[in-house]
Image (cartoon, grey):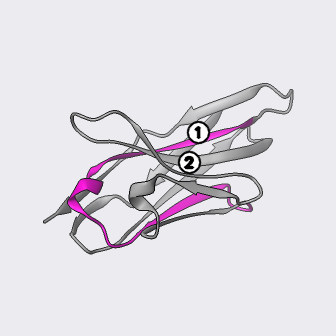
């Protein structure tokens, strides 16, 4: 099994910054894509940012230029640097990881989520 542990959420004023971290552990063999999703009240889950094993990245339009996703392969950790935060960024942020076990079965796992609240 692969487990994800997120950290770094909290309460911040509009215009402020937060950095989320997500560490993967367990039966990691190949850690392919890692990403951050968010779920806000009354809205559908949204892909925020994703990073591949070769560090290619993609972002949802609303966070481009403000958020940066990165990964440390040695630590099996993905980060989300969030700058210029807006109240609309308020949500529970979930980490996702996809990869392969040693027998090449695919895993697709989620963290428990971390709350980000941006006050106006």
Q: Is residue 39 above or below residue 77?
A: above
Q: Earlier in the sequence, mark 1 or mark 2?
A: 1
Which residues, given as a range, are shown in magenta? 73-99
| Label 1 element class | strand
The mark lying in front, picked from 1 and 2, is 2
List x then y, in percent, for residue 45.
38, 36
In the depicted structure, whether residue 103 falls above or below residue 92: above
Spot the residue most to the front. 61
Query: Residue placed farthest to the left in the image?
Result: 120
Q: Answer whether residue 87 is magenta in the image.
A: yes
Horizontal relation, residue 86 to residue 95: left or right: left
Q: Is residue 80 left or right of residue 117?
A: right
Q: Residue at x 77, y 58 (%)?
A: 54
Q: Position of residue 40 (x, y in %)?
A: 27, 41
Quarter of the image with the C terminus in it: bottom left
Camera-side residue of 12 and 58: 58
**In which quarter of the view is residue 73 placed?**
bottom right
Q: Which mark is residue 3?
A: 1
**Residue density around tag 1, few if under 14, some if 14–19, many if 20 or more, within 10 Å:** some
Picture disc at residue 43: none
According to the picture, the residue beneath numbered tag 2 turns out to be: 35
């Amino acid at each position: 099994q692969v487990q994800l542990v997120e950290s770094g959420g909290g309460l911040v004023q509009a215009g402020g910054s937060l950095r989320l971290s997500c560490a993967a552990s367990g039966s990691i063999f190949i850690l392919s894509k890692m990403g951050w999703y968010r779920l806000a009240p009354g809205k559908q889950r949204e892909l925020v940012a994703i990073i591949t094993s070769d560090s290619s990245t993609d972002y949802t339009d609303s966070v481009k230029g403000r958020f940066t996703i990165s990964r440390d392969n040695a630590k099996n950790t993905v980060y989300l640097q969030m700058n210029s935060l807006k109240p609309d960024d308020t949500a529970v942020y979930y980490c996702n990881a996809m990869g392969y076990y040693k027998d090449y079965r695919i895993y697709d796992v989620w963290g428990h989520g971390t709350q980000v609240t941006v006050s106006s």
